[in-house]
Image: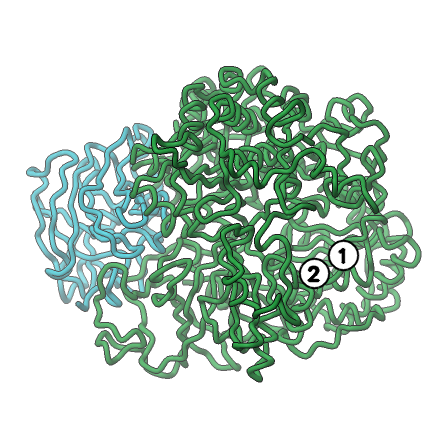
Chain colours: A cyan, B green
């Protein structure tokens, strides 16, 4: 992980290219903002202001109050979807927020068959994973946008996009379909 | 999703109420989970989130384990020329296999496999291609078929049938394999015929065959119902997912003890260990039989063996001789004449297995543990778990399952050892007490002609001929026409560098290359190629494969596949199902049975006038009689009900029926078989299946149903001499800074590489390149970190050359081959991304075996098993060095270096 830190933003542009489906998350520059919120998305370092159409902007915590490797639960994009926010003790992550880019948020629900992932967070050496899911043992890499490490899910663990505004952390969108939904914004 | 980048989506269409529903099964691994296809026209409205608005009758959002559609489970296809939506999800009504609609990552994403020009599947082969002026150019079916047939006929006439080599998948549906075997084995009768995973048409598990065990006798419930389960050479969580999550995991949770032999630790194994009731023998490659022999020895020394079972079910010397050395001397066991190396007088007595195994130094627990790199205490504990009777005298129910890591390391030795161990534990013929393969591909092979063994020029010592090794035959320059169906041939074999070089020499570097569009000239050119000692290559596949298609094929026939034709196949518990056609094959692609039929007709063969796949299946049915997945009686039932075979199978849906099948002419009832070798079946059970007063009419009931596959119906318990293999093992063993290099499959890409690695965005993002797991100590000594680009290389890859006739009993022993100049050493290298993890044994590297871009099989020794003729693919050594840093080390989009054994 020390190597990762050395290469600050080296491939951020390439990384950003593929992290959002533009058809689903229409991204605008800040000056053209007309609705919802204007956020500086950690997923797009250097792109300054951006926003995600359709998703609410919701304050979910304060950076200064996060404890290393301690999960904070929050509901988003509505009160029926459970997610967690975590500062991963210096483990730099895709979509990570804060000076160490180690603050991320993900859905608590396994995308394989909807298993509850509560209590499965693990910090092992440089690795930060959720899993094994109690139902069918899927594990997800939280430093790599929730990609499957080993397991049976058909997509990554949905990542909640975050914005840092001063010390306040806002949830501003979700990448990937939440288990059980046919549309993240309908429940 | 028109890119291989995975773009997470946040909505997906739901099938509307009234969408058409068809059943199928997953196309990939042996387990074959049941799936449902929901299809509706693209111009019709999608379903809504209310229960009365969608095909599932569910209110969305749904809860855990309920019906749901991930974005990767939807696609758009052409059906009867019009665009349709399809949603393909595991069958939530399933009561077998994937009970309740569970699924793996592979099957879960199977909707991504279907052809859609907006996705990475857009490079499907759509038209016959012919290499003209070095370019593969579209041509008509007529031209391509005419040229293939004319050149094929010429090669057979002038160079003999063995110059026409057929290398084909063994598994891709009954209809296709029947047509292919009818063509190659009934009509051409070439001995140069084999399947995708072996150089010659030989059994994968010689020890099972000789002991009398079927590879797939068990029901999945037997893995669950065992109290102690040995799992050798695989992690079923990774490569038989439902067998693990639906059957083994619940058993582990309920206290089942598991014993694993595997050089690495993956998720299922890690889970079992975390529950406190698992032993992991983290062995060096190729040492399995030592551990098994030592366990057997401890059991026998303590008198823990199942004596009642042994009394009833194990052959004495006289009994095992009764079928051998008699009459035509053509039992498989006898053809591998072994001059007393294996045969025993049962378990006890002067020539018994016990006497033998307790007298061999290498089966002393300490010695076995030393060579294998495991703990002798664990060997003793495993023996207790498997066989020690409880205080009340009752015995633990023990089952044993194996797969490729095991039987492709020391093919004959390991499979003999597991058979012997199973027999003394009383396993093999009772519920929860079975032994078999977990399985690889689904079972889609059916007889269309027998292998012409007497035409094979290869002989092992004694009187017997062995199936022709098609790789050595080709390398010797005898193959003039290579007909390759649905396999890469080159990378999927081992020591593959030499094979590739020979293809290049015989095909590309031959001066006779097609430069004309004139049919007669094309035919003359290709005939001249064959006559000049070169080789003509034709290839049937769904994608252009590199290099067999892209570099070598003269003609390519585009094949139609899963979902594009109605097909039939069985899974690892012999469960037969129909795989429904649900969309139009792309372009001019045709199913393999059709392509073979057209080539066959043009070559002048009769019996290829089928009008659809059901006709092929019905013709093939009678050839399945007596085999483990016999489906003939389904057809008899269908006829009685005025239906076709496919119609009857469609009716059986995802539940299907387990072969062998029976039809009771008195009650009109069709029934299947839960397991083979079922010694608990009674006359009453059997009469229900096939009627009173003995089995009637078309029903076939043979020995394997209630007994074992041997001449007496009892098991042969056989020796497994380490000395047959130890010379190779010792020669291979890492020298200087070499490490063992072994390879295999992984969960995310398992019997699905042709779709996953190159064309499924999510999987391509997870595994964008080949990789190698290396232990932290080995990595540190070489300055390697996770994410480094490395090269694995060796200058001593043993390549077995020459088709030989052995005279002496040891002529196929590795040290003899080496001495006589039949082993040539070659160089090879493959690049990979390093994953440093303690999950792999120190001193051992593990990589994915068949990434077509970095085929690591190039490092594996191309030496066939002394006795069986199979490759021991898992045996290899290599050096490794860092050549740079991969981009995955410093970016977050792809790959993951987190260990797979986190629990």
Foreground: B448 or A129?
Answer: B448
CB under 8 Å between discs 1 and 2: yes
Residue B165 x %, y % = 78, 52
Q: Residue at x 50, y 62 (%)?
A: B685
Q: Residue at x 43, y 22 (%)?
A: B380
Look at the picture and state if A79 lies above or below B829.
below
The numbered mark 1 sits on a residue in which chain?
B
Residue B496 x %, y % = 67, 39
Quarter of the image for residue B643 reads: bottom right
Question: Which element type, helix, strand or loop, lies under badge 2?
Answer: loop
Quarter of the image for residue B406 reads: top right
Q: Residue furthest front?
A: B693
Q: Could you classify mark 1 by the number of other residues whose Cα lies within 10 Å: few (under 14), some (14-19), or many (20 or more)?
A: few
Foreground: B427 or B520?
Answer: B427
Q: Which residue is mark 1?
A: B450
| Separation of marks 1 and 2 at Cα, in angstroms | 7 Å
Foreground: B628 or B808?
Answer: B628
Foreground: B321 or A118?
Answer: B321
The numbered mark 2 sits on a residue in which chain?
B
Q: Which residue is mark 2?
A: B447
Question: Which element type, helix, strand or loop, lies under badge 1?
Answer: loop
Residue B97 x %, y % = 42, 58
Q: Could you classify mark 2 by the number of other residues whose Cα lies within 10 Å: few (under 14), some (14-19), or many (20 or more)?
A: many
Quarter of the image for residue B505 reads: top right
Look at the picture and state if B767 lies above or below B859.
below
Look at the picture and state if B723 lies above or below B34.
above
């Amino acid at each position: 992980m020390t190597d990762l830190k050395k290469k600050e933003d080296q491939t951020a542009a390439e990384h950003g290219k593929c992290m959002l489906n533009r058809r689903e998350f229409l991204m605008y520059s800040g000056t053209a903002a007309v609705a919802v919120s204007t956020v500086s998305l950690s997923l797009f370092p250097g792109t300054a202001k951006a926003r995600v159409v359709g998703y609410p902007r919701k304050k979910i915590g304060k950076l200064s109050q996060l404890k290393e490797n301690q999960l904070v639960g929050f509901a988003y994009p509505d009160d029926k979807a459970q997610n967690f926010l975590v500062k991963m003790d210096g483990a730099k992550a895709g979509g990570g927020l804060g000076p160490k880019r180690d603050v991320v948020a993900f859905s608590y629900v396994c995308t394989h068959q909807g298993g509850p992932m509560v209590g499965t967070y693990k910090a092992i050496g440089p690795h930060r994973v959720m899993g094994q899911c109690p139902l069918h043992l899927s594990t997800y890499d939280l430093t790599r946008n929730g990609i499957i490490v080993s397991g049976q899910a058909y997509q990554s663990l949905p990542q909640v996009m975050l914005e840092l505004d001063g010390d306040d952390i806002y949830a501003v969108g979700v990448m990937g379909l939440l288990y059980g939904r046919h549309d993240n914004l309908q429940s | 999703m028109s890119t291989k980048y995975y773009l997470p989506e946040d909505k997906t269409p739901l099938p509307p109420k009234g969408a058409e529903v068809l059943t199928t099964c997953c196309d990939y691994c042996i387990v074959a989970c049941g799936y449902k296809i929901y299809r509706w026209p693209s111009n019709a409205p999608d379903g809504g989130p209310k229960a009365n608005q969608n095909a599932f009758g569910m209110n969305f959002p749904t809860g855990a384990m309920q019906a749901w559609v991930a974005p990767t489970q939807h696609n758009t296809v052409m059906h009867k020329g019009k665009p349709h939506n399809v949603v393909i999800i595991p069958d939530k009504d399933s009561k077998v296999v994937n009970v309740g609609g569970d699924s793996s990552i592979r099957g879960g994403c199977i909707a991504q496999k279907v052809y859609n020009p907006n996705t990475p599947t857009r490079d499907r082969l759509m038209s016959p291609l012919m290499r003209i002026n070095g370019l593969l150019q579209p041509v008509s079916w007529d031209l391509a078929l005419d040229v293939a047939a004319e050149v094929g006929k010429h090669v057979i006439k002038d160079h003999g049938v063995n110059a026409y080599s057929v290398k084909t998948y063994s598994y891709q549906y009954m209809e296709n394999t029947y047509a292919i075997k009818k063509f190659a084995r009934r009509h051409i009768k070439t001995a140069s015929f084999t399947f995708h995973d072996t150089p010659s048409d030989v059994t994968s598990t010689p020890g099972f065959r000789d002991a009398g065990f079927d590879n797939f006798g068990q029901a999945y419930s037997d893995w669950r119902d065992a109290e102690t389960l040995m799992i050798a050479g695989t992690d079923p969580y990774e490569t038989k997912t439902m067998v693990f999550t639906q059957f083994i995991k619940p058993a582990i949770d309920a206290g089942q003890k598991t014993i694993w032999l595997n050089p690495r630790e993956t998720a299922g194994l890690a889970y079992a260990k975390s529950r406190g009731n698992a032993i992991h023998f983290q062995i060096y490659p190729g040492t399995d039989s030592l551990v098994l022999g030592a366990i057997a020895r401890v059991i026998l020394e303590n008198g823990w063996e199942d004596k009642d079972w042994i009394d009833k079910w194990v052959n004495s010397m006289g009994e095992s001789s009764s079928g051998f050395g008699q009459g035509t001397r053509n039992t498989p066991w006898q053809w591998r004449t072994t001059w007393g190396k294996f045969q025993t007088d049962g378990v006890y007595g002067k020539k018994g297995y016990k006497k033998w195994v307790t007298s061999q130094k290498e089966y002393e627990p300490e010695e076995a543990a030393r060579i294998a790199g495991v703990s002798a205490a664990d060997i003793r504990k495993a023996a207790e778990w498997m066989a020690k009777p409880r205080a009340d005298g009752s015995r633990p129910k023990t089952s044993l399952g194996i797969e490729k890591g095991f039987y492709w390391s020391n093919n004959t030795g390991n499979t003999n050892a597991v058979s012997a161990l199973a027999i003394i534990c009383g396993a093999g013929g009772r519920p929860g007490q079975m032994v078999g393969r977990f399985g690889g591909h689904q079972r889609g092979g059916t007889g269309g002609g027998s292998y012409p063994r007497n035409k094979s020029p290869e002989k092992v010592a004694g009187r017997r001929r062995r199936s022709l090794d098609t790789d050595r035959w080709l390398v010797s320059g005898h193959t003039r026409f290579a007909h390759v169906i649905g396999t890469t041939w080159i990378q999927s074999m081992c020591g593959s560098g030499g094979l590739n070089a020979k293809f290049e020499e015989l095909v590309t570097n031959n001066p006779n290359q097609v430069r004309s569009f004139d049919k007669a000239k094309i035919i003359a050119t290709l005939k001249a190629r064959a006559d000049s000692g070169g080789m003509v290559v034709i290839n049937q596949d769904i994608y252009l494969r590199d290099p067999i298609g892209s570099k070598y094929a003269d003609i390519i026939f585009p094949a139609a596949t899963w979902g594009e034709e109605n097909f039939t196949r069985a899974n690892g518990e012999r469960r037969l199902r129909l795989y429904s056609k649900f969309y139009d094959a792309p372009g001019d692609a045709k199913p393999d049975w059709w392509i073979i039929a057209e080539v066959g007709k043009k070559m002048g063969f009769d019996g290829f006038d089928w009008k659809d796949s059901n006709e092929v299946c019905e013709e093939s049915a009678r050839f399945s009689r007596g085999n483990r997945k016999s489906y003939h009686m389904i057809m008899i039932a269908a006829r009685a009900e005025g239906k076709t075979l496919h119609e009857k199978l469609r009716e059986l849906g995802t539940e299907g029926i387990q072969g062998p099948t029976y039809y009771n002419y008195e009650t009109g009832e069709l029934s299947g078989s839960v397991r083979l070798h079922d010694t608990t079946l009674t006359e009453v059970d059997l009469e229900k299946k096939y009627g009173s007063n003995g089995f009637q009419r078309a029903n076939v009931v043979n020995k394997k149903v209630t007994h074992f596959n041997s001449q007496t119906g009892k098991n042969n318990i056989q020796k497994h001499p380490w000395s047959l293999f130890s010379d190779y093992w010792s020669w291979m063993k890492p020298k200087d800074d070499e490490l063992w290099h072994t390879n295999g499959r992984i969960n995310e890409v398992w019997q699905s590489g042709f779709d996953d690695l190159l064309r499924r965005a999510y999987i391509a993002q997870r595994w964008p390149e080949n990789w190698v797991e290396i232990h932290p100590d080995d990595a540190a000594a070489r300055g390697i970190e996770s994410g480094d680009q490395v090269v694995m290389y060796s200058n001593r890859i043993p390549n077995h050359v020459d088709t030989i006739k052995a005279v002496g009993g040891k002529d196929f022993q590795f040290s003899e081959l080496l001495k006589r100049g039949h082993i040539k050493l070659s160089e090879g290298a493959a690049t990979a991304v390093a994953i440093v993890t303690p999950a792999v044994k120190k001193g051992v590297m593990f990589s994915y075996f068949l990434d077509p871009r970095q085929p690591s099989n190039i490092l594996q020794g191309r030496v066939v098993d002394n006795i069986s003729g199979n490759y021991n693919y898992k045996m290899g050594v290599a050096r490794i060095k860092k050549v740079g840093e991969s981009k995955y080390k410093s970016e977050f989009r792809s790959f993951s270096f987190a260990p797979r054994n986190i629990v």
